């Protein structure tokens, strides 16, 4: 059918035509935003899910909601390399610049700007913009220890935001890539603004291992955050995700075709978009039927193998590849680490560092002690289709 009208949006962070099955998460986020804004207790949230489940899309949705609720928002994606202080600095500066325009917040904003100046100097952040022409404030955010200085900054910004009658909503994607000390500092900072009932709220997103990482960084993290699970869509939501956009274009899809898509994609949002997209382009005419899906599957798999899966596989070293190939050789996950070791003919303890390295890269995670699984749904199938262990 006409590719120009194709409604589906496969891609990292692409807004889906129908954001299906996430009403609860969005409702909870909205409640937390509203409560925080009026100084009522609400938990910050860490959205946890595998690759391609729609975490980034949800963060975008929450950001928009936050803006509507009168928040200034700052969005960051944590990369594997850059320090958190460097990522946060320009965002905090931007928020303060906006607050400085509001008369009632001038004094508090000026204080926060001073603190920011100290913060930049102790963390050696390049100050590109000289508009922060204030002197640093001795004793605030200048210890050089992020765990003290970040809370100071959050409190200073929160105080200024409150004086302005605004809120500050910080959103960080890929939180699992933060260093442990950074995550700890972030947790302390969020704890601090919560205690002071300042209008500051945090939403993070990341891979499932983040729950454990945050607990390791600060044991009270599990009480501080709520951890909404961003999983595959249930059948009803998955059908809505495919059928809705097709019908909005005044076309049709048979229920057999829908069921086939559900079976293959297991309801994973990214795959739903990919299959919807290919099914639309493959079909000659409406309604899209099961034979169209069979052809679409070929195209979808080809595209995934050359893109989504391949780029992730390419990030592994030869030794790490050997490890994930051994995992997939066992079949469907989760896998016992000991079983993988056995397949590789190595002692499990010797493989520990390699396993940790692959976890740090975000390719695998440990759903429970001694087990591992892929963070990318259907990655095992991809490896079995394309790679095998060298003899
Ligand atoms: N609720 C949903 N319904 C339908 N499609 C969705 C939904 N959520 C996300 N998608 C689609 O899934 C794809 C992946 O979304 P997104 O990039 O937000 O996932 P992610 O969890 O951030 O993945 P990653 O961990 O790789 O960053 C996009 O193409 C998006 O349009
Ligand atoms: Mg994402």
Image (spheres, rainbow, N blue to C red):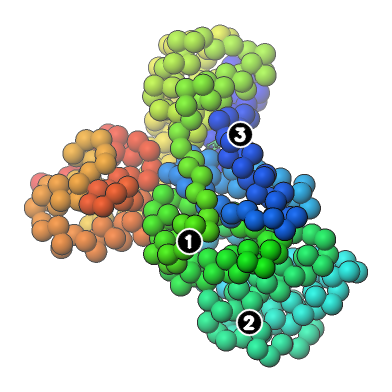
Q: Position of residue 17 (x, y in %)?
A: 63, 30
Q: Which residue is mark 2?
A: 141
Residue 23 image label: 3
**Depicted 220 relative to depicted 294: above or below:** below
* N-term-proximal mark, 2 vs 3: 3
Residue at the image point whose x is 63% and y is 63% from the top = 194
Toward which corner of the image does residue 287 lie, by quadrant? Answer: top right
**Left of 41 or right of it: where is 48?**
left
**Left of 157 or right of it: where is 263?**
left
**Depicted 186 relative to depicted 66: above or below:** below
**Left of 73 or right of it: where is 382?**
left
Q: Position of residue 53 (x, y in %)?
A: 48, 39
Residue at the image point whose x is 57% and y is 22% from the top = 240
- What whole-number distance in Å separates the C-alpha atoms at marks 3 and 1? 25 Å
* N-term-proximal mark, 3 vs 1: 3
Q: Residues within 10 Å of mark 2 (few under 14, many from 20)?
A: many
Q: Which residue is mark 1?
A: 221
> Which quarter of the image is occupied by the N terminus?
top right
Toward which corner of the image does residue 346 lie, by quadrant? Answer: bottom left
Residue at the image point whose x is 53% and y is 25% from the top = 237
Determine the secondary structure under disc 2.
loop
Q: Is mark 1 within 8 Å of ligand 1?
A: no
Q: Nearer the viewer, mark 3 or mark 1?
A: 1
Q: Position of residue 249 (x, y in %)?
A: 67, 18
Determine the secondary structure under disc 1.
helix
Q: Position of residue 223 (x, y in %)?
A: 49, 57
Q: Nearer the viewer, mark 1 or mark 2?
A: 1
Contact between labelled residues 2 and 1, with CB atoms less than 8 Å apart: no
- What whole-number distance in Å separates the C-alpha atoms at marks 2 and 3? 39 Å
* N-term-proximal mark, 1 vs 2: 2
Q: Is mark 2 within 8 Å of ligand 2?
A: no
Q: Is mark 3 within 8 Å of ligand 1?
A: no
């Amino acid at each position: 059918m006409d590719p120009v009208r194709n409604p589906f949006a496969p891609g990292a962070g692409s807004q889906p035509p129908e954001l299906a099955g996430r009403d609860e998460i969005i409702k909870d986020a909205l409640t937390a935003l509203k409560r925080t804004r009026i100084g009522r207790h609400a938990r910050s949230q860490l959205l946890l899910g595998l690759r391609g489940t729609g975490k980034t899309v949800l963060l975008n949705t929450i950001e928009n909601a936050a803006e509507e609720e009168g928040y200034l928002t700052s969005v960051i994606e944590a990369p594997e390399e850059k320090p958190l202080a460097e990522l946060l600095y320009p965002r905090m500066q931007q928020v303060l610049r906006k607050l400085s325009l509001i008369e009632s917040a001038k004094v508090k904003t000026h204080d926060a700007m001073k603190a920011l100046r100290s913060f930049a100097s102790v963390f050696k952040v390049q100050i590109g913009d000289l508009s922060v022409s204030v002197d640093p404030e001795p004793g605030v955010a200048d210890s050089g220890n992020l765990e003290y200085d970040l809370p100071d900054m959050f409190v200073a910004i929160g105080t200024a935001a409150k004086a302005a009658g605004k809120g500050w909503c910080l959103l960080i994607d890929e939180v699992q890539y933060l260093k442990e000390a950074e995550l700890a500092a972030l947790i302390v900072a969020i704890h601090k603004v919560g205690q002071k009932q300042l209008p500051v709220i945090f939403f993070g997103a990341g891979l499932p291992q983040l729950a454990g990482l945050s607990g390791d960084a600060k044991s009270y993290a599990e009480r501080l955050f709520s951890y909404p699970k961003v999983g595959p869509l249930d059948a009803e939501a998955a059908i809505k995700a495919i059928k809705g956009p097709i019908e909005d274009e005044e076309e049709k899809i048979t229920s057999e075709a829908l069921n086939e898509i559900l079976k293959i994609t297991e309801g994973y949002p990214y795959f739903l978009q990919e299959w919807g997209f290919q099914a639309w382009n493959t079909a000659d005419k409406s309604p899209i039927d099961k034979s169209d899906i069979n052809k679409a599957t070929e195209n979808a798999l080809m595209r995934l193998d050359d893109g989504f899966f391949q780029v992730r596989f390419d990030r592994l070293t030869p030794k790490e590849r050997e490890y994930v190939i051994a995992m997939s050789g066992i079949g469907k996950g989760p896998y016992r680490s000991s079983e993988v070791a056995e397949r590789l003919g190595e002692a499990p303890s010797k493989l520990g560092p390699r396993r940790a390295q692959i976890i740090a890269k975000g390719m695998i995670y440990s759903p429970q002690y001694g087990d591992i699984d892929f963070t990318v749904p259907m990655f095992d199938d991809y490896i079995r289709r394309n790679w095998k262990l060298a003899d």
